[in-house]
Structure formats: C-alpha cells, structure tokens
C-alpha cells in the first residue's frame, strides 16, 4: 500500500504540467455541472473513450481533487505517534520476525524472540505492541512487544504500589545483594534483607520459585521497583503477635523455640512473637554463656515474667519453673559441716564456691590460711577449682553462707614457738612481694615478712623484686614472734655478719677505689665498689677534668668523701681526685713562687747593703777634701 501511494503521487505530479490533460481532467470533473447547463452537447466519434487516461492507462486528477482523495486515503489509516501502545493482528510469520498489522500505512516487524513466552503463535492472533519508530531509515515501521509489556507492567506495578496489593512473581536469577524477580514481565529487585524475617545466606535456593511479594519502593525516573517477601511474613506475624499479646499473662507457661543465642541471653519464637530469655533467668546456677544450657532450635517450656504491650517485649524465665535451690537445701547442711564446692566467682575480698546449682558460699580472704600475710584472692583461686570448706555461718532466709578453708586444719600458731623459735634458721617460699618487703611461707598457715632493709647488708633495692621473685626459695632467720597478732619478723641478711664493721678501715674517707657506674639519674649515680659494696656519687662529683661526666657502665677512680656505717652509706667523688691534684699543683707552684720571691728579696737586700756602705765612704773622703780646700782658701786671704 505504501508503494501504491508513492506511485500515485508521482503520476499526478508528472501530468500536472500538461495543459491538455488538465483541460480534459477539468472537463471530466465538471461533467455533472455541464449536464445541468442548457447548452446542447455535440456528439463526436468515440464519445465513449475516456480521454483522461494516458498511454500507461493511468488517470490524472487535478490538484484539488488529488488533495481531496489523499485526505480520504489518509483517513483510512490509524494515526499513531512514537511511544504509543497499540493493538495489531499477526499477518505473517518468518523465521526471525512476526509481521503485525496495526492499521497503519505499512505493516511492522517484531522480533520473534519477543514472543518466546507465547505458545502456538499463529496468523490472526491479536497482540499489543509499542510504536518505537513510525519510519526508520529504511522507511519501515518499528514495533516492539517487549517495550509494550514493560510499559504495561510498570503501569501495573505503580498501581499496586499505591494500593498495597499482593502480587505474584518468579525469581529468575541471583544478583549482588539479592534476587531478580519477574513481575508482570518486568524485572524487579528483591534485596537479600527482604527475602525472609530470618537471615538468608543461600540465595540460590529461591531461583526459579514463584512467590508472593509486595512492591515497597519505586523509582519513576529509571523505572525501577523493589519488592519484598519479608513484608508479607511480617504482616502475618504482626497479626499473630497481636493475638498472642492479647492473651498474655504474667506467670503463663508457653512453649517456644530457641531462634538465636547471644552473650546476654536467648531469643525464643513463641509462635509469631519473640521473647527474650535472659542469661540470669536460664539457670539458678552461674553460667558464663547461654549455650551451656540451651541450643539452637531447641523447644523449651518457659514462663512469662513480664511483657510490654507498646514495645512488644516479653521477658521469659526458665529457672523459675523449678524450686529455688535455697528452699530445698539438704537437711544435713548446717554450721560446722564440711562441704565441697567449685569456684564460680573471684573478688578482691574472697571467692564464691558453688555448693550446688544456685547455692553459693563466700570464702573470705581471712579464711584462706592461718598465716597473717595478705592474700590476693585472684592469685590464690582459679575459676573451676574445687575446694573442701567448713560452713562458718548459714542464713537460709537471707540465702547467705560463709565458708572457711583454713579451719579444715588445726591452728599452727598455737605452738609456733616450738617449731619456729627465735634466731632459728629455715627455708621458705616467697608467696608475695610488696614495695616494702617479701612475704615468706614457712609451711601452710605459717609465714612472715622480710623487710626490704633486711635483704642485704651491702645493697639498697628500689623494690624487693630486684632481689627475689614469687615462687623462689629463700633462706631466713626468725627475728621475732608476735603470737597474739600472728606475725613473724624474718631476716635474710642477718644470716651473715655485718661486713660494714670490717670495711670501715678499707673505705675510710680519703681512700681511692675503682668503681663502675651501675645506674645514673638526675641526682647522681650508683657506683659498684669492691667487696660488693655500693656507693653514691652526687651529680657534681661525676665531672671529669675535660668537662665531661662519668657515664653509666663506665669504670673510673673514686674518692671516698663520706662513710657512715650506721646508715650503710658511702659517698664518692671522681671530681675531687683531679681537683685535689690541681690544688696540690697550685700549692706547689705557690710555694715555689714564694721561695723564689724570698730569695730575690734577700739578694736585693744584700746588694742594697753593699751600695749603701760604699756611698758613705765616699761621702767621708769628700768631706775631708772639702775641709782641706776651705783651709787653703783661708791662708790665701
């Protein structure tokens, strides 16, 4: 039809310039009008021949009539625009395309691939397509069934998003972060978090499944939609939740399934409603983690402890279904009885022993040992260790019990002077170290302290740990016994004689000794001397003759400038050595200068004495001569 119209227009334009043809066409066109005229028409030969037909047997029309017929022809076709959705009939099928007649000037082609979802497509079927382009470069009408389906699908998706209608879709594939779902023939996105109320890790299990969804989000600009299956589940759960909450009562026993376990408790599914079983409500006894008692997917009977209608929170209990252990204590458990327990908690003041689940007793630090030495409970006890102890106090109403480990044996302090008399020597185990001394255990329950000043005659320690360590054996001597306060004063240096008495002459003030600087600070340096002694050199006494100072680990000569036997203190100086030499040299030079000065004065004095005598003699001779001259002048007169 398109070719026919083009040919008709070409013929009309070709004959437009022929006057004769125009006149014939005009005469033919005005024939009815001439018939009404009173003029008499003269008949000629061949009057029945149509002179408007040319040699190609094609009629020619005037411009006005051609325009009129063009309008009539055009009105027989459908008026369409690009992007318009129209319906058409299948008029032909090829190996690759479907020919669709939509009532336009020409038929359109649609790829056969766009009909893959249609079974048994045949000529005469009616389909809906979109006009992609009315006339492409080749003059063909470009149609698309896929675009039409997507357009209609998007309209439907927008509609159900507004109404909240539940739709059905098929999961076609897996993508990053979720699944692709075919809804009305359009691809939508199902995020992984919207698949189910429970976390989903295996997305492949949903590919190919047909499921119900709700459209939860759309983007008009890019024609994109997000669907959710979780929303449907949540709406169902919410209905169940409301029904369960309306029937809840405190103390009600329900059956639930453990759905999640955390450090602080276990979440249970009560049939559409979640409840929390706190770790403290799982067992009467102490547990470190809920998984010690409950397991995933385990069915349990629990009791409702509390619930909040507004926040939809339910607190559950498991231990409340059994009697409190303090209410069913064994009849034989009383003060003075011996029990066995496991350490379940350790504090600075003692440790708690679990006698049976939910029943605990406290072993105070003062009830650990008969010794009066301080005990660190966190170092003495370990979680899980078991001990036998004696019940000291028992209060069933307050649910408290105090225990004692030391009372499991006799008090050794009652006969302490027999086994550990004063001035006796023993070996002990270092149990604890403090900044002021070392606590030594001689036997279980018996111990004492060595003061830091009683560790060594010769060395001073900043901390006792510089001399010994916890767990080491150390020799001691009993210095004194305080039986009432359960204290032993121990010594270590007293095992040897005081070397300061013998070294007083060796390290007398003014003596020189070689020493090594062991430690240095802003005040001065500690110097290691012979015989194991240590001295102290103030900072200004470390100066060298060249202006530098004696450094740490450097060996040099030191002068004893102070020795205090009672305070066990030696003060040293390196600077005094070269300062003394310099002073002596100055003194010698001074003495030599003075001696030289004295000799010079003496020599000058001798010379002066000689000069004075000669001068006096000369004066006497001159006087005599002068006198004689005066006499001669008198005679002449």
Image (cartoon, helix red, strand yellow):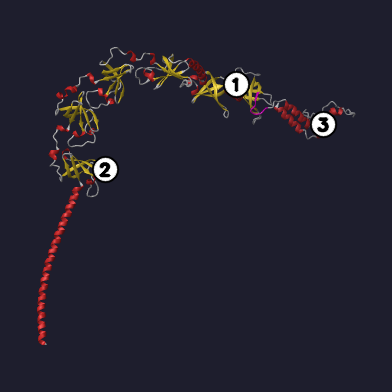
**Residue bearing mark 3:** 26
Query: Badge 1, how many Cα within 10 Å: few under 14, some, many 20+?
Result: some
Quadrant of res 48: top right
Query: Badge 2, how many Cα within 10 Å: few under 14, some, many 20+?
Result: few
Residue 253 colored in magenta in the image: no
Mark 1 or 3, closer to the camera? 1
- Horizontal side of 454 relative to 322 (left or right) equals left
- Please identify the quadrant where the C terminus is shown: bottom left
**Residue bearing mark 2:** 522
Where is residue 202 shown, x and y percent of the image? Answer: 46, 21
Secondary element at image label 3: helix
Where is residue 123 shown, x and y percent of the image? Answer: 65, 19
Query: Which stretch did the figure color magenta?
Result: 80-86
Quadrant of res 12: top right
Where is residue 173 shown, x and y percent of the image? Answer: 51, 22
Most extreme residue toward the bottom is 637
């Amino acid at each position: 039809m398109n070719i026919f119209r083009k040919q008709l227009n070409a013929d009309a334009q070709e004959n437009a310039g022929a006057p004769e043809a125009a006149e014939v066409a005009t005469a033919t066109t005005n024939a009815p009008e001439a018939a009404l005229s009173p003029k008499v028409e003269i008949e000629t030969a061949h009057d029945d021949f149509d002179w408007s037909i040319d040699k190609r047997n094609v009629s020619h029309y005037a411009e006005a009539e051609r325009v009129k017929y063009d309008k009539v022809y055009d009105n027989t076709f459908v008026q369409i625009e690009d992007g318009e959705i129209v319906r058409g009939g299948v008029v032909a099928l090829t190996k690759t395309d479907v020919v669709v007649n939509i009532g336009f000037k020409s038929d359109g082609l649609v790829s056969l691939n766009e009909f893959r979802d249609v079974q048994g497509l045949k000529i005469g079927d009616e389909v809906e397509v979109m006009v992609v382009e009315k006339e492409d470069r080749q003059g063909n009408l470009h149609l698309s069934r896929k675009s039409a389906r997507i357009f209609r699908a998007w309209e439907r998706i927008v509609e159900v998003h507004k109404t909240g209608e539940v739709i059905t879709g098929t999961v076609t594939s897996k993508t990053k972060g979720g699944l692709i779902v075919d809804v009305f023939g359009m691809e939508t996105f199902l995020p992984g978090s919207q698949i189910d109320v429970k976390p989903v890790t295996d997305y492949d299990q949903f590919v190919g499944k047909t499921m119900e969804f709700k459209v939860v989000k759309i983007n008009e600009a890019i024609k994109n939609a997000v669907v959710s299956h979780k929303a449907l589940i949540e709406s169902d759960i919410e209905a169940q939740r409301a029904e369960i909450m309306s029937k809840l009562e405190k103390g009600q026993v329900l059956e639930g399934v453990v759905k999640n376990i955390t450090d602080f408790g276990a979440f249970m599914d009560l049939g559409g409603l979640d409840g929390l079983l706190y770790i403290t409500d799982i067992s009467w006894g102490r547990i470190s983690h809920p998984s010690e008692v409950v397991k995933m997917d385990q069915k349990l009977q629990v009791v409702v402890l509390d619930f909040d209608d507004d926040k939809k929170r339910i607190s559950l209990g498991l231990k409340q279904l059994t009697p409190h252990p303090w209410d069913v204590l064994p009849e034989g458990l009383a003060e003075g009885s011996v029990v066995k327990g496991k350490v379940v908690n350790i504090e600075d003041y003692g440790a708690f022993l679990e006698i049976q689940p939910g029943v605990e007793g406290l072993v105070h630090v003062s009830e650990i040992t008969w010794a009066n030495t301080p005990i660190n409970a966190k170092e003495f006890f370990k979680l899980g260790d078991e001990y036998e102890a004696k019940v000291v106090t028992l209060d069933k109403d307050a649910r408290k019990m105090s225990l004692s480990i030391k009372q499991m044996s006799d008090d050794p302090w009652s006969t302490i002077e027999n086994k550990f008399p004063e001035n006796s020597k023993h070996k002990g185990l270092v149990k604890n170290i403090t900044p002021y001394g070392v606590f030594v255990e001689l036997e279980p329950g018996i111990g004492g302290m060595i003061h830091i000043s009683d560790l060594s005659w010769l060395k001073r320690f900043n901390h006792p740990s510089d001399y010994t360590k916890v767990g080491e054996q150390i020799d001691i001597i009993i210095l004194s016994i305080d039986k009432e306060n359960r204290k032993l004063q121990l010594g270590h240096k007293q095992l040897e004689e005081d070397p300061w008495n013998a070294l007083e002459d060796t390290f007398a003030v003014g003596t020189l000794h070689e020493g090594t600087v062991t430690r240095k600070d802003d005040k001065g340096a500690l110097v290691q001397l012979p015989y194991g002694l240590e001295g102290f050199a103030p900072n200004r006494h470390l100066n060298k003759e060249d202006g530098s100072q004696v450094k740490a680990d450097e060996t040099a000569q030191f002068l004893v400038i102070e020795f205090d036997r009672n305070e066990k203190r030696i003060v040293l100086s390196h600077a005094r050595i070269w300062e003394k030499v310099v002073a002596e040299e100055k003194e010698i030079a001074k003495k030599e200068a003075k001696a030289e000065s004295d000799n010079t004065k003496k020599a000058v004095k001798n010379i002066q004495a000689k000069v004075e005598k000669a001068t006096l003699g000369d004066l006497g001779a001159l006087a005599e001569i002068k006198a004689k001259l005066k006499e001669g002048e008198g005679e002449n007169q």
